[in-house]
Amino acid sequence: MSAIHCHQLCKTFRQGDEIITGLDHVDISIEEGEFVCLSGPSGSGKTTLLNAIGGLDTPDSGEIRMGDIRIDQLERGPLADMRLHHIGFVFQAYNLIPVLTAQENVEFVMQVQGIPAAERSRKARDILREVGLEGMEDRRPAQLSGGQQQRVAVARAIVSHPDLVLADEPTANLDSVASTHLMGLFSELNENHKITFVIATHDKRVMSYARRLIKMQDGKIISDEAQ
Amino acid sequence: MQGFRLHFVMLLRLSWRNLWRNHRRTYIMLGAISVGVWAMIFMTALMRGMVDDMLNQGIHNLPGHIQIQHPAFLDDPSVVNSIAEPEGELLAALNQPGVKRWATRIKVPAVIASERESRGINLLGVEAEAEADITGLPAQVSEGRFLESNQDQGVVIGAKLAQRLETRLGKRVVVMSQDPDNNISERGFRVVGIYRAEMPGLEEYNVYAARDTLQKLLRIEGRVSQIVIVDQDYRDIESLYRRIEKVTPSTLEIKPWYEIDNYLAAMFNMMDGFVLVWVIIIFLALSFGLVNTLVMAVFERVREIGLIQALGMRPRLIVYQILLESLLLLLIGLAIGNGLAIITVKPLESGLDISMVAEGMAMMGASSMLYPNLTLHDMLLANSVVIILGILTSILPAWRAAHLDPVRALNST
Ligand SMILES: Nc1ncnc2c1ncn2[C@@H]1O[C@H](COP(=O)(O)OP(=O)(O)O)[C@@H](O)[C@H]1O
Ligand SMILES: [Mg+2]
């Protein structure tokens, strides 16, 4: 059910008297298990597209389908449920709940899903080990480096096997070592768990990991090629 | 159910940790709630003590919690409207264990005269040993003694009356009244005791003699004006009242204290209203702080709220989380406030001397000692008001937090 189809998506923002184009008739299909990079200069509409796919924002017109579900037509509650069970998010920064430890942050989503404590705790520990954070389970976000925080966010995004992970500039605040580590992790998870990844970035090194590169400009898709 | 429990544990953890994120603000708010709750309960205990005292005084003056009398007696308390002493079923009911005390008494208008003066009075013929529970008069005797038996030949008069009559302890006075056939009946009494009433007005009018002595004087052997019943607690006389009413002959009239004296009833009924209003006023002052605290708490974590929305937490759960945070704050504040109130009221329950400010109060029937009365009922009332209104005032900030636009929330700095 994880294939995503966007059809003629439009989104504009109003800023004072100005009308700003976020998305301009975007058509895009992403199949199950793909590893896609959205690239383009700042302001080209990458975030707007990710937010629309993830149901955080609704387009002005057009359709977004995930399998049979019209995401653009869901109410707040069902949208939240859809994100909870099918989509993982990784943002540029401040991904974690500051009052919870790494382990608790990873367990948070599972808790909302209603997974029993023992199972939750085991899964969280396993996934934290997989992203290389063994021994840091009880640290609060403030006690982790930026790269470690991003890895906790990734662990949380994938722990309950979502169909899709949306990552918005996940490496923007990381040094090159941490970026490389994170991208390695993404492609590994994509191969091992068959999770679809859509990563917005304007970082060349990140794009080199992608198997499909979509370029955007002024809210339009200007190229879409496998590599 | 399982899901609910999981959510609750999660929300509780989030709320608790969020609460201590900004220690200073939490401590200030806790201080405000504690002091507010303390003030609610402390002042309520004082008011309750004062009103209880007035009601007790008032009921002592009626006297009794329940009265049985001739239907015309309250309008015309003359000797003609007397009744027979209780017998049969009524007597059996009166002697049941639930009744704290019952007694018969005579009450007729009369004239009292010394060698110098005479005054119109209320002549009361009472059962000597029951009077402590019924009017509390024996404790108010300041000179001499109270009546010692139902056949006692003396009278006990008020200090004010003694002054007016220019008589004193040990002197003789003459009491005059009418028998049922309108013949004057009179006899001399020795003043055996002088009392001081909380309400000075009463001292001039109420003159106490022994019941049997008056029956003889008024030629109404075996008859009395009233049967007076005292229950364990004046607040809770319904069941006793109903039991006695059932066996009271239909020729007699039975009334609970709150029907005899509307003023007392009004005071009693208004008290809960007063307490509620007082508690709400303090709560309103607190609510500004509470709402402000929550609004600030939400404002500080807008981004985080965007994040948990993105992670798929339903708005409803976000509302619950913030309400729970508010509830925790309220519960801790209530615990401290209740504790403070108990610690400060308990030592005062043995009595607080307010004679310095009590001159004016005496007119209203209050004594110069104030006995604060901390009741479970009032504490529950204050606590429920704080919790219920606290949650209600928290709903708006919580709702607004849950309905932030996630994209904007995530982008806020
Ligand atoms: N909430 C908003 N209000 C006004 N303009 C916005 C808003 N969000 C995005 N935009 C504008 O929409 C355009 C696309 O933005 P965005 O999708 O964030 O681009 P990118 O993520 O590629 O940098 C930009 O011009 C941006 O300024
Ligand atoms: Mg962006």
Image: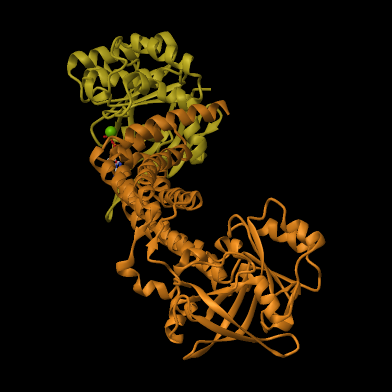
Whole-percent x, y for residue A156 in the image: 38, 21
Residue A135 quadrant: top left
Instruction: Name which residue lies at 34% across and 13% down.
Output: A128
Residue B174 quadrant: bottom right
Q: Which chain is yellow?
A: A
Q: Between A226 and B222, which is closer to the camera in this rendering?
A: B222
Vertical arrangement, residue A168 with respect to residue A72, above or below = above
Residue B71 in view of the camera: no
Count of picture labels = 0
Instruction: Name which residue lies at 72% across and 90% down.
Output: B182
Whole-percent x, y for residue B401 in the image: 38, 44
Residue B259 quadrant: bottom right
Q: Between B112 and B243, which is closer to the camera in this rendering?
A: B112
Q: Quadrant of the C terminus of chain A?
A: top left
Residue B255 in view of the camera: yes
Instruction: Name which residue lies at 35% across and 58% down.
Output: B352
Q: Between B157 and A168, which is closer to the camera in this rendering?
A: B157
Q: Which chain is orange?
A: B
Q: Quadrant of ligand 2?
A: top left
Horizontal arrangement in the rendering, residue A43 relative to residue B84 (left or right): left
Whole-percent x, y for residue B54 in the image: 48, 67
Whole-percent x, y for residue B111 in the image: 57, 87
Instruction: Name which residue lies at 26% across and 45% down.
Output: B28
Furthest toward the left, the residue is A175
What's the colour scheme? Answer: by chain
